[in-house]
Amino acid sequence: MSFEQRLVRSIVLGACLALAACSGGGSAGDSAESSQDGSGGSDASGGSGGTGADGTGGSGEAGAGDPGGTGGGDTDAGASGGSAADSGGSAADSGGSTGTGGSDASASSDAGGAGGTSGGSGGAGTSNGTSGSGGVAGSGSGSVPEELVGVWQETRASAGEYTNEFGESFDITSGFSVQLKIASNGAYYFAHLASGAAASCDSVSYFDQSVGVAELEGDTLTLFPDERRLDVTDCEGSESEVLANDAIPLSISLEDSEHYYGGLRTHIMHVDGGPHPLDLTLLHRPPPDDPVQPDQPSDFVLGATGPFADFQGLWVPDTGTDSDFFDPSTGEFYFPELNGSPHQWIRFYGDAYETAVALQNYNAEGACKGDLIYYEQGLGLFQVTEDVGGQGTHFVGHGRLAATAARLIVNVRECDENDGVYEYAVEPLMSYYRFIYFTPDSPPESLFLDCGTFPQSEWQSTLCTTDITYHRRE
């Protein structure tokens, strides 16, 4: 997308922010919709999660790696481990070995060319399924560390009272959306859209955009624009102005954080040096090399048997749940439509299990959106700790799911040339749960896996976005 095309979009974006009604997010007064389906807008404190400047610097598209083969789907079901009432039964005999995970996604070796000052660039290469360089406009040849590369965003429905660098004073009803894209060669695109009531007019928007080169020295990130333009819409109409390419020094610091929905790790970039502080969230951070694996909790009772005979089969949270979005035997996937139902499932067969979840709009900030699919397979051990009421219909216990293969798929969308799908074969981990099971004699039959009793492993957060009660589908 050219610089001029972005300016056309600024009119739409300005109106969008003023109305707090951009696609992908609710209005400033809307709280987040149910986290089960991810269809809501921003969280209650964040305002309009979908509003913002989604203009981007033109460049080559990031090519996603070809997915590696995913194991699973061919594990033979062994003998079940007895009924839920039998807490001391022997371990179930597995009828076959559990499938192993696929290899990391393959990737193109063609490096992306440097972007032109007005947004042109070559195609971006990829490595191990992660985003390649060259995905932003600007001339490149800057110097930035790897952790700064990516799409950084913040959206606020109310920014308080402040005066921008152009002398316009905004009151507490103002809002803003900021986007900073940085490529590995230092090329950057920066957009700051502020809209709201001001001293000069009841409805004013300022859209400041620049492309160029970013350099980090110490804790100062300096943007050196090749081009910079300001679009202003107020009571007197709209006008555009080409600004001087003066350096823009920003004082920054990074903080480890997690996305609000799904718990994937990310960074927050705290930025000072503008009219007001910014807290920019990285849209997509590759999976960490040191995933969290908690030790077995001291109060956890490890069972000696696999999933009980009562548990065998496919379980889903709701009748509207899509349980076909990921095929373990082929690795093929799609993101199911939002319909108010959680798209998550778990299947027990013999002493093995497999589970998957699809989450959409996992990020709370900015116009660029992220979705994810997480899948794992492995072996389960369960132990009944209480037969509630002694009736044999309501059981409480502990379960350990030990993954042998796991896969994470991230989809970046509504982000122009930064759109892409990234696939990772991640490290399999163990997860600890407390379960509650009601038999068919205490209808409806249900299985609840409590995520809050024991510390969670790294990827477990994707499966524990909300309290899920499963019901048997097959």
Image (cartoon, rainbow, N blue to C red):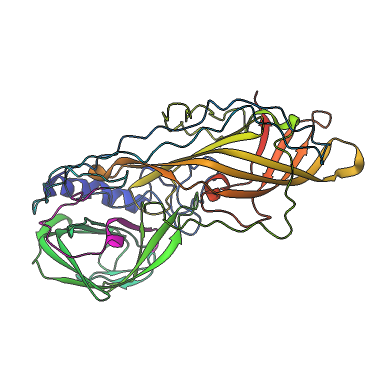
Most extreme residue toward the bottom is: 218
Image location (x, y in percent) of residue 54: 27, 49
Q: From what the image shows, is residue 375 above or below residue 464?
A: above
Q: Nearer the viewer, residue 437 or 259?
A: 437
Q: From what the image shows, is residue 413 above or below residue 143?
A: above
Residue pictured at 18% horizontal, 60% vertical: 186
Q: From what the image shows, is residue 319 above or below residue 282?
A: above
- Which span is picked out in magenta? 132-158
User: Going by the image, does 244 lie left or right of 155?
Assistant: left
Among the 4 quarters of the image, the one containing residue 122: top left
Image location (x, y in percent) of residue 359: 48, 41
Residue pictured at 22% horizontal, 39% vertical: 108
Among the 4 quarters of the image, the one containing residue 424: top left
Q: Is 150 colored magenta in this rendering?
A: yes
* Residue 289 seen in the current view: yes
Q: Nearer the viewer, residue 316 or 303?
A: 303
Most extreme residue toward the top is: 474
Q: Is 355 colored magenta in this rendering?
A: no
Residue pictured at 79% horizontal, 28% vertical: 440
Quadrant where the C terminus is found in the figure? top right
Provide the major secondary structure of the magenta segment. loop
Image location (x, y in percent) of residue 332: 41, 28
Image location (x, y in percent) of residue 241: 10, 60
User: Going by the image, does 282 lie left or right of 466?
Assistant: left
